[in-house]
Image: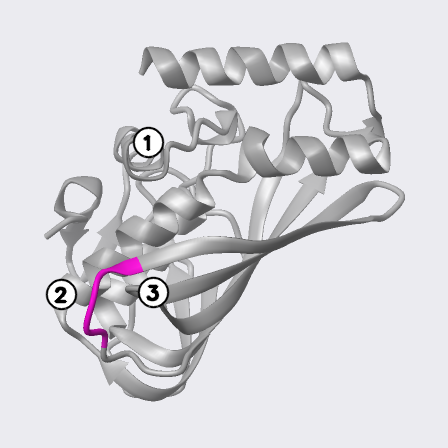
């Protein structure tokens, strides 16, 4: 399976090491957010990996929403309950919610379809920075603190007209917006999912950009250049 190298199962709990999480972010999503670097003091497991593990466990329903309720640290045991409920709560070893899922409609548990969605969504999701966020921050005159960058995955949802695909899946950006608050901003990345050339579904990803400060073009551009240099070197 696609995800096998990126997690460990023991005593019915799933855990992800810092190295596994970092490799998933970089290899599957081309995501070089410093918060996923093993040495980062604020390290957390990528939301895209938790999302992917949920799809592998429960399949893909026609309508699903995912809300990330707490950050997951390295080697933290996670319980993905065996349930047929429409409301699913993923918890850590202490019983605290880390991911909550709402689902409805027909379920597709075909492994090839699930892996296709994981791969395509991961590649779409990894465009967050600098491709999508840089123009939005410039437009609104704000940016995160390059010395303490904090861009967090809050939630995502999607609706398929059908989970029975006949052709290759594609995911494309439909729209990107930024709503600025005094201390943070909410970024909404809307996307469309295609069965070949046929529109098969729509979704939205919400990010929180924390620690806002006034936009400084040279400063954030230097940060973006360093980010892309790390990605190119990898």
Q: Could you say where residue 19 lies in the image, as x and y percent from the top left?
A: 28, 28
The residue labelled by disc 1 is 18
Q: Reading the chain from its start, which is encountered first: label 1 or label 3?
A: 1
Which residue does the image show at 45% across and 11% down from the upper left? 229
Which residue does the image show at 78% across and 43% down from the upper left? 184
Which residue does the image show at 81% across and 36% down from the upper left? 139
3D distance between C-alphas at marks 1 and 3: 38 Å
Q: How many marks?
A: 3
Q: Is residue 82 above or below residue 126?
A: below
Q: Nearer the viewer, residue 165 or 84?
A: 165
Q: Which residues are magenta?
A: 165-169
Q: Could you say where residue 91 lies in the image, as x and y percent from the top left?
A: 40, 63
For the residue carrying disc 3, how many other residues have a C-alpha within 10 Å: few (<14), some (14-19), or many (20+)? few
Horizontal relation, residue 83 to residue 62: left or right: left
**Badge nearest the viewer, 2 or 3:** 3
Horizontal relation, residue 155 to residue 58: left or right: right
- The secondary element bearing badge 2 is classed as helix
Q: Reading the chain from its start, which is encountered first: label 1 or label 2?
A: 1
Q: Is residue 71 above or below residue 51?
A: above
Q: Is residue 105 above or below residue 153?
A: below
């Amino acid at each position: 399976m696609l995800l096998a190298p990126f997690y460990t199962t023991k005593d019915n709990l799933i855990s992800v090491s810092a190295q596994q999480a970092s490799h998933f972010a970089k290899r599957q999503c081309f995501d070089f957010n410093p918060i996923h670097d093993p040495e980062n003091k604020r390290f957390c497991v990528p939301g895209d990996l938790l999302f992917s593990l949920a799809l592998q466990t429960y399949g893909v329903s026609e309508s699903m929403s995912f809300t990330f309720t707490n950050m997951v640290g390295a080697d933290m045991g996670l319980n993905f309950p065996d349930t047929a409920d429409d409301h699913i709560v993923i918890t850590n070893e202490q019983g605290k919610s880390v991911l909550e899922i709402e689902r409805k409609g027909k379920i597709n548990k075909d492994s090839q379809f699930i892996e296709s969605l994981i791969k395509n969504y991961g590649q779409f999701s990894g465009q967050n920075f600098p491709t999508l966020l840089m123009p939005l921050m410039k437009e609104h005159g704000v940016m995160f603190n390059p010395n303490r960058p904090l861009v967090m995955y809050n939630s995502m949802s999607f609706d398929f007209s059908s989970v029975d695909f006949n052709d290759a899946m594609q995911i494309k950006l439909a729209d990107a917006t930024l709503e600025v608050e005094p201390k943070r901003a909410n970024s909404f990345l809307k996307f469309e999912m295609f069965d070949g050339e046929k529109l098969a579904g729509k979704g939205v990803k919400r990010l929180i950009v924390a620690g806002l400060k006034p936009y400084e073009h040279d400063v954030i551009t230097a940060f973006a250049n360093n980010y892309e240099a790390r990605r190119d070197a990898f």
